[in-house]
Amino acid sequence: MSASIEIAGVSKIYDGGVRAVDAVAMDIRQGEFFSLLGPSGCGKTTTLRIIAGFETPSSGAIRVDGADITHVPAHKRDMGMVFQNYALFPHRTVAENVAFGLRMRGHDKASIATKVKAALAMVELSGLEDRRPAQLSGGQQQRVALARAIVIAPRVLLCDEPLGALDKKLRQQMQFELKQLQKKLGLTLVFVTHDQEEALAMSDRIAVMNGGRVEQVGTPAEIYNQPTTRFVADFIGDTNIFRGERTTTGAGAPALDVGKGLILALPPSADAQGAGALSVALRPEKIRLSPRGDAAGGAAGTCAHGVVENTNFLGGAVLYRITLEGAHRILVQQPNAGTSHLFIPGNGVTLDWTPADLVVLED
């Protein structure tokens, strides 16, 4: 049975006043794949280590299924842990590495042998019981570390960037396998990563962290499509962020004057934002691109003209950097429709979008 986790106002202050985690509060649901996402030094690994019991918070509490475990030792928390460097014993075989946690818990030999065999079958390593870590590939070592964590049947599995050392193709394969295994076992899984694509692909929900604080918690779709802060909008994928003063279009609709002649019509929800300056985000793939002079183009505040500065071919899509007439630079991503549809540097283009494509950000 998996468990729910409550992180209640947790802070961690090290000697010298370094505040690694600052009043973090969030709930992780039972059976959820929950990711802590953010840049290096944002506090995500420290938060994970506090959940695991390797660090004691300076304030706040950790509760599992309502029980306070803040001061319960790590080995009594019924949690499995997978580390970034796998932390395998090099002198022990695969089977001995996987059996370690069971032996520490006093299981008998017959029970250990049965459980180890089942765990290795689950991670597709049957037949490699007698090999040592140095005889395995990176992906196989990662599976051994995973088997060692799940063989003790933990209620919570904690993973600290476990895929970071793998090449891209193997990393993607392991993402699918880890997600599938988590759902099969029904584990509550807390996953630390700095990779935005990885978090979006694997998570049920994501907590985006910055400077020891949680900026936003939401589903991958919510985090990507409705970022609440400038940091989240800028950190998750490519985006265009504009800041300006509220105004209105000629038709009286709410708009944002970002200067240099560029006016952006705001979504109706922006009516509640009040007067003054604000920031908005516009994803590159929300913008439509057409040759300058075509009939395409929106109403005032929903279109602009510019010149292609450079292109970045992504395979399934093309990312354009475009200089607008007012000297603003903007990113536009278009599906790859073949070479005959590509724009090249120097092409004049028209860009258009809808007000609903803009997301108003909190200051």
Image: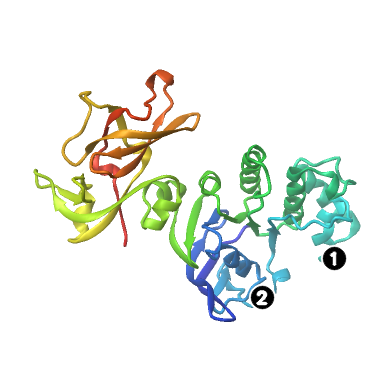
Percent x, y for residue 319? 42, 35
CB of mark 2 within 8 Å of CB of mark 1? no
Rendered image coloring scheme: rainbow
Percent x, y for residue 94? 85, 50
Q: Is 186 or 310 nearer to us in this picture?
A: 310
Query: Is the residue 34 above or below the residue 316 in the image?
Result: below
Q: In the shown orientation, is residue 281 left or right of residue 200?
A: left
**Quadrant in which the N terminus appears:** bottom right
Q: Is 307 or 269 nearer to us in this picture?
A: 307
Disc 1 marks which residue? 106
Q: Residue at 75% across / 52% down in the picture? A: 145
- Tag 1 or tag 2, which sits nearer the N-term? 2
Query: Is the residue 298 above or below the residue 273 in the image?
Result: above
Disc 2 marks which residue? 72
Q: Residue at 82% across / 44% down in the picture? A: 136
Q: Residue 288 carries which label?
A: none
Q: Which amino acid does label 2 sit on?
A: Val
Residue 60 seen by the camera: no
Residue at the bottom extreme?
Answer: 16
Q: Which quadrant holds residue 112?
A: bottom right
> What is the secondary structure assignment of the residue under circle 1?
loop
Category of crowding for the residue at label 2, using alpha-carbon neighbours closer than 10 angstroms: few (below 14), some (14–19), many (at least 20): few
User: Disc 2 to disc 1, how far (Cα)?
Assistant: 20 Å
Q: Which quadrant holds residue 353?
A: top left
**Quadrant in which the C terminus appears:** bottom left
> What is the secondary structure assignment of the residue under circle 2?
loop
Percent x, y for residue 175? 62, 43
Q: What residue type is labelled 1?
A: Gly
Q: Is 180 or 110 nearer to us in this picture?
A: 180
Residue at the front extreme?
Answer: 346
Percent x, y for residue 260? 21, 48
Category of crowding for the residue at label 1, using alpha-carbon neighbours closer than 10 angstroms: few (below 14), some (14–19), many (at least 20): few
